[in-house]
Image (spheres, grey):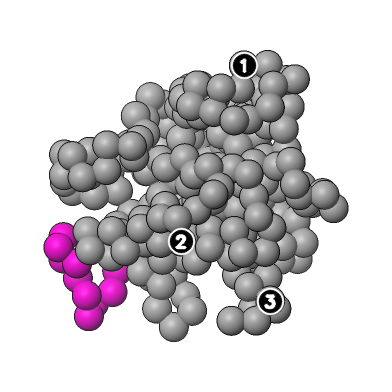
Amino acid sequence: MTNHLNNNMLKVPSKIGLPVTVTSGMDSLEKCLNKDHFLNYKNKITYCYNSRGYRDSEWPDELNNVIWCIGDSFTVGLGQPFSETWTQILESKTGIRCLNLGEDGCSNDTIAMRVQNIDKLYQPNIMIIMWSYLSRRRKNGKNVQYDSESFGSNNDFENFRSNYQKVNTNRSVKVLNYIIPKASDNEQFLRKTYPELEIVNQIDYARDYHHFGTKTSMSICKSIMKKIKLFDKKSKYC
């Protein structure tokens, strides 16, 4: 794979150049899971994407001292103000630039590919992965909800095992592994097989009544900071 293709893996083409909006996907009155919750949500939300197609400000020129955050719509922060996403709270608490590489509907296949490309191109110090639903796949260059040719719990776990190993084997970079709630119908097996993988405990809900609320984002950041020993804005990650 050429460097050009590697760099393209670090973009979300469908979001590049979009105008600022106040709703997105599930975060709309038509698609949310609880219309009363949506209508009573008080905080203002806007969606603005950078030149790479991520819900983030532009990346700095210097990428040696950043935290890479990779995931799906739970990392995008769907249904949340940008400042309340777990990546932005982490940046605020640590004083270290946190790059938000969240993509709506992202599969673990794509997440693993992104992590490998980041590792190859930028030699990062730390990456935080928020793994997605095990049933999702990358097919013909696109994320799909499941692969009809490889469907079922056993195949889902085998696919996740492969991606997890690709990301966590023989890497000098520090990788912290989290996974969204209800990513699998057998969380007990996940906990037993991957004890270092933290399944997020969802405390509250975003405006769409599905994604993380502010308290959940805060809890995630507290866990991350404890793991990488970041206690104040002058701290360096280990």
Circle 1 sits in a helix, a strand or a loop, which is it? loop
When the figure is inspected, residue 15 is found, relative to residue 206, above or below; the finding is below
Q: Amino acid at mark 3?
A: Asn
Q: Which mark is residue 179?
A: none
Q: Is residue 173 above or below residue 116?
A: above
- Disc 1 residue type (three-letter): Phe
The three-letter code of the residue at mark 2 reads Ala
Label located before the other in sequence (1 or 2): 2
Disc 1 to disc 3: CB gap under 8 Å: no
Q: Nearer the viewer, residue 174 or 62?
A: 174
User: Badge 3: few (under 14), some or many (20 or more) residues near its Cα, within 10 Å?
Assistant: few
Label 1 vs label 2: CA separation? 29 Å
Foreground pick, 114 / 212: 114
Q: Nearer the viewer, residue 8 or 115?
A: 115
Residue density around tag 1, few if under 14, some if 14–19, many if 20 or more, within 10 Å: some
Q: Quadrant of the C terminus?
A: top right
What crowding class fits label 2: few (fewer than 14 Cα within 10 Å), some (14-19), or many (20 or more)?
many
Q: Residue furthest top?
A: 232
| Residue 181 as seen in the image, left or right of residue 231 | left
Per the image, the residue denoted by label 1 is 231
Overall secondary structure of the magenta section: loop
Q: CA distance from mark 2 to mark 3?
A: 17 Å
Q: Which residue is mark 2?
A: 112
Does any portion of residue 15 appear in the rendered image?
A: no
What residue sits 67% from the left and 46% below the top?
99
Q: First in sequence: mark 1 or mark 3?
A: 3
Residue of label 3: 3
**Residue 125, quarter of picture:** top right
Q: How far across and down, in percent of the image, does residue 96 sit?
A: 72, 32
Q: Is residue 219 visible?
A: yes
